[in-house]
Image (cartoon, grey):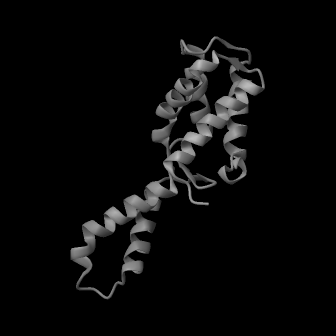
Amino acid sequence: MATRRETVHLLCKSIITRLENQKSISFPPRLRQIVHDEVFGLIGPYILTDQDLRERALAKVGARAEMLEDTQFTDSEQYKAAKAVVRSTFGDDELNGFYFQRNIKAIAVIIREYLMRSSHIDDVYETDEDLEKQIVEVIQKFDAANLH
């Protein structure tokens, strides 16, 4: 299954839901969507998707299409070449169609720091290390195909 920006939203929702179900955090249910959106706003820029890869590769092909017209490249070859170039800029941390621009541990730290300082979160019941460990575990085991 190809990942999209919506898949990153689902990942954020899964992280918060898991922490809430494990009684690691508590917050008023009416603020759930706000918490999900804020977490997405914080980590979304650091998690690229297959959709991002495709869009950037197509943009690259579009920008070079005129230059490549005189060569023997077919559209699919142009796209594959552009995709490989764009993919090389996405970094080495790839997991389940997510391309992490920071390592997973650093993303867990960003989320933990948010949970500790957010006025929307009533309480955090875990140590920093345990919270980060749970977040990393959710990210590593996340599979959008299993959510349906």
Quadrant housing the N terminus: bottom right
In the image, residue 124 sits, relative to residue 22, either above or below, namely above
Residue farthest to the bottom? 72
Residue 143, position as x, y percentages in the image: 68, 50
Residue 54, position as x, y percentages in the image: 44, 62
Q: Is residue 103 visible?
A: no
Residue farthest to the right? 22
Residue in front for this viewpoint, 147 or 71: 147
In the image, residue 105 sits, relative to residue 95, either above or below, namely above
Residue in front for this viewpoint, 29 or 60: 29
Q: Is residue 69 visible?
A: yes
In the image, residue 119 sits, relative to residue 132, either above or below, namely above
**Residue at image point 69% right, 45% down:** 140
Residue in front for this viewpoint, 93 or 118: 118
Q: Please count the marks in the image.
A: 0
**Residue at image point 64% right, 19% down:** 29
Name which quarter of the figure residue 69 lies in.
Answer: bottom left
**Residue at image point 65% right, 50% down:** 144
**In the drawing, does residue 124 fall left or right of residue 8?**
right
Residue in front for this viewpoint, 116 or 146: 146
**Residue at image point 73% right, 15% down:** 125
**In the drawing, does residue 39 fall left or right of residue 64?**
right
Residue 91, position as x, y percentages in the image: 50, 53
Name which quarter of the figure residue 59 lies in.
Answer: bottom left
